[in-house]
Structure formats: structure tokens, C-alpha cells
Image (tube, helix red, strand yellow):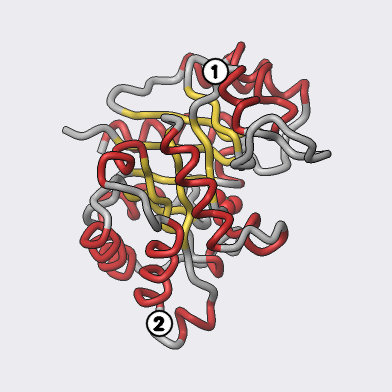
Amino acid sequence: MKSKFLIANWKSNMKYDDLEPYFKELNNCSKYGIDIKIAVPNIFLLESQKKSNFDIVAQDVEYFKYSSHTGRMSYEHLQDNSIHNVIIGHSEQRIYNDNTNEIINHKVRTLLKEDFRVILCIGEDYETYNNKKTIEFLYDQLENNLKNCDKLMLNNLIIAYEPIWSIGTNTIPSNLEISNIILKIKQKVNVPVLYGGSVNLTNIESLLNGTEGLDGFLIGSGSLVISDFCNMIKIVQDN
Ligand code: PGA
């Protein structure tokens, strides 16, 4: 059986004092056959790395080397600190931090070449969904974001399908819609595909059992309470 991915995305949440109890409980919860990764705010990358038995993930990074870019973090900083997993293209980065498809393509290419594991987020807004243009939109994102990446580089790529209208809203596409989209994404790029957007303890089992081709989840607010996250891990492990 292929192992499933469960990636927690803390976004800009959690305090320093939360790290110790969170990782203590996480390290103790069962995780057979599950690849668990935790995406934390930059300021917690190192401390989390020390406390966690699992991969720590950066929520974004720049594609340039050490240089004069005040307030930015180079991918070389991650390498220097043995962080090898990065989320790229989260819709909150695309929308609020001007991460265009071109910039995302630079990031994905650079990071894959440098042997990072890249979790590339793609997803449509509600208008696109409503106009039934989701697949065209996702294919366009994939084409632009993965330009000039050769097949070999894609070995380290994971795609997270996250419809923007579903993030933090408690509204999710039907299982059938998710299955169809995953199939379409895999027809274009054959890599693990995760679903993200309002995944929580109450819906994870139905998502898991009702969808096809799903390789795991990217979980935002549902991952912040460690007992809930551990219970989700258990559900994924038992199904
Ligand atoms: P959510 O966020 O689970 O809080 O909807 C998911 C994400 O944005 O990665």
C-alpha cells in the first residue's frame, strides 16, 4: 500500500509555548504508513525541527541565493538548516504576496533542481468553479508553474489541490468532483495529489473513503489542535 501524506499547515498561527506540547503529542501518536509533515511559520522552523520526529516544512521561500533582499528568506537558508520540504504557490501567497505563475515557476524549478520536496498548491476561485472552468484553470496553472521542469525533476513534486473557495470556509467540493479533478491532474502530471480546503476531524473519513486517487491531505485550521490532528492521523491509518 502506498503511504498517504498528511501535511499540517499552521499558516501564521501558534505561539512558541505551543511547540513543546504539540510535538510531544505528535511524536507519540501512531502513524503507520503515513508521511506526516508540519508546515510552520519561519520563526519556528528550527525549534520545530529540533522537537519533531517528522519533516518540518517551510510555507514559502525565495528562489534566489543569499543576496540583498531585506525581509526575504533564500532557499539557501533552508538548505543550511536541513529543511528540505517547502510549500509553493499557496493561494494566500498568490493573492496577498504577488506570487505570479512566473515567480512560482522560478521557485518550483529552482527548488526541484536543488533536491527539495515541493508541495505545489493549485486551485480555482468560486467564479471559475461556478463557470465549470476548473480543469482548464488548473491545467493552465500546471503548465505555467511547471514550465521547463523535466520528468526526472518531478519525482520530488507533490500537488495539493486546494479550491480557494473551500479554504477556511467549511464548504468542500463533492467527493465525485474531487475524484474527477485528481484524475485529471494525474493525467497531466503523474505525482501524488493531495486535497486541501476545510478538511477536519468530521469530514476526513468520508473524503478518504469516498474519493479515488487521493494521496493525502493538506490541513490548515484542522491541524492546529494536536488531539484532533492525531485523531485524523489515526483515521487515515485505519482506513
Ligand atoms: P483550511 O486551510 O484547512 O483551514 O481550509 C487549508 C490550506 O489553506 O492549506
* Rendering coords of residue 38 (x, y %): 54, 31
- Of 80 and 165, nearer the camera is 80
For mark 2, what is the residue?
Answer: 133
Q: Secondary structure at mark 1?
A: loop
Q: Is residue 77 above or below residue 159?
A: above
- Image quarter hosting the C terminus: top left
As drawn, the label of residue 24 is: none
Q: Is residue 51 above or below residue 31?
A: above
Q: Which image quarter: residue 142? A: bottom left
Q: Which image quarter: residue 109? A: top left
Q: Earlier in the sequence, mark 2 or mark 1?
A: 1
Q: Amino acid at mark 2?
A: Lys
Left or right side of 139 for 64: right
For mark 1, what is the residue?
Answer: 82
Q: Residue at x 22, y 56 (%)?
A: 212
Q: Secondary structure at mark 2?
A: loop
Q: Residue at x 36, y 23 (%)?
A: 31
Q: Residues within 10 Å of mark 2 (few under 14, many from 20)?
A: few
Q: CA distance from mark 2 to mark 1?
A: 40 Å
Which residue is most to the left?
1
- Of 207 and 125, nearer the camera is 125
Q: Amino acid at mark 1?
A: Ser
* Rendering coords of residue 141 (x, y %): 44, 66
Q: Residues within 10 Å of mark 1 (few under 14, many from 20)?
A: few
- Image quarter hosting the N terminus: top left
Which residue is most to the top?
50
Q: Residue at x 64, y 33 (%)?
A: 65
- Of 12 and 65, nearer the camera is 65
* Rendering coords of residue 13 (x, y %): 72, 39
